[in-house]
Amino acid sequence: MSFSNSSSVTTNTGGQRITKVKMENPDLIGNLSNEIKIMILSKLSIDEAVRCSVLSKRWEGLWKEISHMELNVKTMVKPFTQLLQSRKARTFPDFGAIAPPMVKSVSGCNSLVIMMILATHSGAMSSCRIKHFEKSLAFGDVECWVHILVESKKGLKDLSLESMPHCEELTDKIVSDEHTFLPSFLHGVFECLSSLELINYTLNSCLPFEECNKLKKLTMKRIYLDDGTLSGILKNCVVLENFNLLESTGFERLIIVKSTLRVLQLQALCVDEIQLCCNNLEVLLLESVICAVKNVSISSPYLKTFHSYSNSMYAKMLSVENGKSIMKTHEVLAHCSGLVVFRNKNQSSNSSKYGDYSHPISKLWQRRELCYCIGQKLKCVYIRGFRGKEQEVEFGKYLITKATMMKRITLICSSDSKEAAEKLLSLPMASGNLSINLILNGNNPMEEFVEHQNRLNL
């Protein structure tokens, strides 16, 4: 880096002395304030942030003040783990017999490095993400890191923990089952957090969530837990507003009765029963949920946004393994009490009977009573993957002729379903402000981008 800004050259021309000043490029990065440099370092992983200390003396030690810390043991001890793997075939032909002590040494190295980093950090930390090997749970390392964070970093609000297979271990299981190593977090260890993310763990107790009076966002992905643990966690999180339960197993019933909840995402779950009673819920996202529709009950009178997808490959494998089918969107709609924005992606309907309806499925929307939210609140509908099937057409007719506050309906369809979509354009509209946009094929990204912006402006 250059610290001088100019240099001068003196020449003699015709007895006159002329001085030319040559300006050098200013050191813009080096002249940044420490606050901006720390903000930049907070966007990097911890190993990258520490390496920035070699740029110049102005950057040295600034990583100790970062507000967000990203710890990934795969990158922090990668040379050592690669050495172990490279020696497996040549030096240790019977590596399986001595793997435990070797694994323990690697885990100890991880723990020592992370402990040193946490002890060296002296700034105010607001968020932290730790990705560790699964074997670290066997030696209590993860619990120790979390304890240090919550005790020494009083400003910590957001925490993300992810367990990874050690040394790229592979598994023959399609669907994750109960893990070998269980975390033993202290009682109420998460009480100071406002956001928590847990990925790839087995939880057998709700005690770490005791007195979680500040936790507003909870994400659990690939978690194995039973019904009692799940119920206890939700009960302890008294102000929870955003709950995401993804690709998790072990529980048979999903019962959520919570008036504080505003955003709920359920993805790739297989359960026997779903009961949602969330009076203030505004956003509901259901992606590839496996459950008999007759056992689904959703009560959310103030729901504003509803998304329904069935694209999860994990859920499709889960469906095959359990011999059950993923819920269809029109089945979910029959049990949902309030929508303002409905989005349907790659979802087709069938003409079979379902539930306890005595009339044919083709008459479902004709006979269905008009609910208040569709008649008086629904403003925008976006249907992608419209194929012109019976229930899709009937649902379109129902919206066009019943929704009095509707402003825009967008249909993205193929040329094969163009005729069925065009027939909807001639229907009498309940709303005088309704515009129906028909996009063929959906291959034009600019058209979809413009439509997306229009939906956001509604």
Image: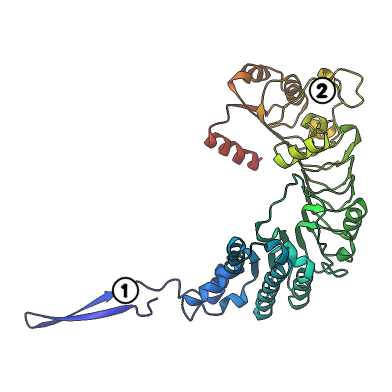
Q: Residue at x 86, y 63 (%)?
A: 209
**Residue 87 image offset from top left, x and y in percent:** 59, 65
Q: Which mark is residue 365?
A: 2
Q: Looking at the picture, does residue 90 appear above or below residue 452?
A: below
Above/below status of 218 relative to 358: below
Across and down, in percent, residue 148 comes to 76, 76
The image quarter containing residue 84 is bottom right
* Residue 248 point in image, percent of width and height: 80, 49
Quadrant of the image for the C terminus?
Answer: top right
Question: What residue is rendered at 56% in x and 77% in y?
Answer: 62
The residue located at (75%, 59%) in the rendering is: 197
**Extreme front residue here?**
93
Dot 1: within a 10 Å radius of its alpha carbon, few (fewer than 14), some, or many (20 or more) residues?
few
Viewer-proximal residue among 278 and 79: 79
**Furthest-left residue in view?**
14
The quarter holding residue 434 reads top right
The count of marks equals 2
Q: Secondary structure at mark 2?
A: helix
Tell me if I can see residue 97 in this picture.
Answer: yes
Q: Which residue in the protein does label 1 denote?
A: 24
The residue at the point 67 percent across, 23 percent down is 387
Q: Which kind of residue does numbered mark 2 sit on?
A: Trp
Could you say whether the residue bearing mark 1 is in a helix, strand or loop? loop
Q: Is residue 307 visible?
A: no
